[in-house]
Amino acid sequence: MSGEPRTASAAAKVRFREAQIEMAHGAGGKASRRLVEGLFAPLLFGASPEPLGDAASLRIGGARMAITTDSFVVKPLVFPGGSIGELAINGTVNDLAVSGARPEAMVVTFILEAGLRTDVLQAEIRAMGNAARAAGVRIVGGDTKVVEHGKADSMYITTTGLGAPLPEVEIDPRSVRPGDKVLLSGPIGDHGITILLARGELDMEGDLRSDTRSVFPLVNAVVQAAGTGVRWMRDPTRGGVATSLNELARDCGLGVVLFEDNIPVHDAVRGACELLGLDPLHIANEGQFLAVVAPELAEAALETLQKVPGGDEARIIGEIREQPACSVLVTTLYGGSRIVDMLVGDPLPRIC
Ligand code: MG
């Protein structure tokens, strides 16, 4: 449920009226938000005034910690640039990182289908071990369940992560102010379109790889450069950059204005999106993050980010303004502009 923020007022209004669960409820866009705010939150969290972020912040026995959980159902299991096991580690690592926490420990749960080949499972366990070591996170426990053949699609993985909050930063969408700058760590849409191409659903060849990676080194560089000037961060996974920034706009009550020409998009992603009538701003990423940084620190944060390996394509892609309140406006060099909403429906199911 992490990643679907709400405001207290929004939570009070939303009612979940659908008679059954549909694919769109798992897409991370509008339907997911209705499910979380209208069904899960009222019954599990009560009336919390806190916006929900990528990880929850807790104080236990005097110690602060961040906790998050995520399930992975990606199809196919292996794709250019990564696989389900690797994604299961990095996805949870990244939710901790963009919450301003250093990923420390993780427990993992496997739901396996009877008949799954051991070599396939072993490859994913190995991928998880490698990703965890690369991210500096310890795997400290787990659970395995097996269901009958045909009842699960080879395997599903759930990871739950604990992190230590970085003392330099406090992530809260309510601290965002007009004039703040929006940073993006690199090109968007690579993961979602890679999965689509790997399924062979598009008659298109693309030299594209998933961007899956730990973003913690990049996040940490921005935090060290800008400290409390970093107001908000998010990894734009399902629903893409547009959904993440719409959630921010709702939570802070301000407008997010994007400069489209500054947003890095690989040609293969742009081409696939044009074919499918999709907006790259709605396509999932697994190795990027957005940061809103105070204007006087934004350039320094960007320069620092660009010097970290994998951060060279980072850009300032927009800024916060009073208007259009609670919305995301995309502008172009030629003077065009359009409002971009959260993702509606589920054009690319089971991408993570
Ligand atoms: Mg997230």
Image: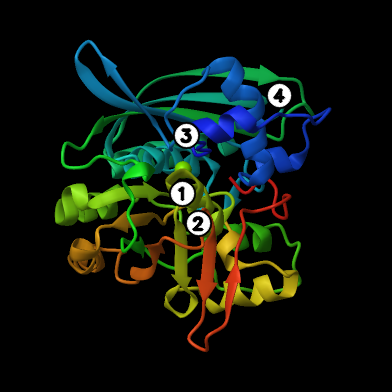
- Disc 1 from disc 3: Cα separation: 43 Å
Report the amino acid beneath label 3.
Ile
Which label sits on residue 107? none
| Residue receiving disc 4 | 114
Frontmost of labels 3 and 2 is 2
Tell me the residue at 46%/33% (across/down).
Answer: 52
- SS for tag 1? loop
Tell me the residue at 43%/38% (across/down).
Answer: 89
Please tell me which of labels 1 and 3 falls first in the chain: 3
Q: Are marks 2 and 1 in contact (CB under 8 Å)?
A: yes
Frontmost of labels 1 and 3 is 1
Between 332 and 239, the residue placed more toward the observer is: 332
Q: Is residue 170 above or below residue 66?
A: below
Report the amino acid beneath label 4.
Ala
- Can you see residue 214? no
* Mark 1 burial class by Cα count in 10 Å: few <14, some 14-19, many 20+: many
- Disc 2 from disc 1: Cα separation: 6 Å
Q: Is residue 343 left or right of residue 109?
A: right
| Residue receiving disc 3 | 125
* Mark 2 burial class by Cα count in 10 Å: few <14, some 14-19, many 20+: some
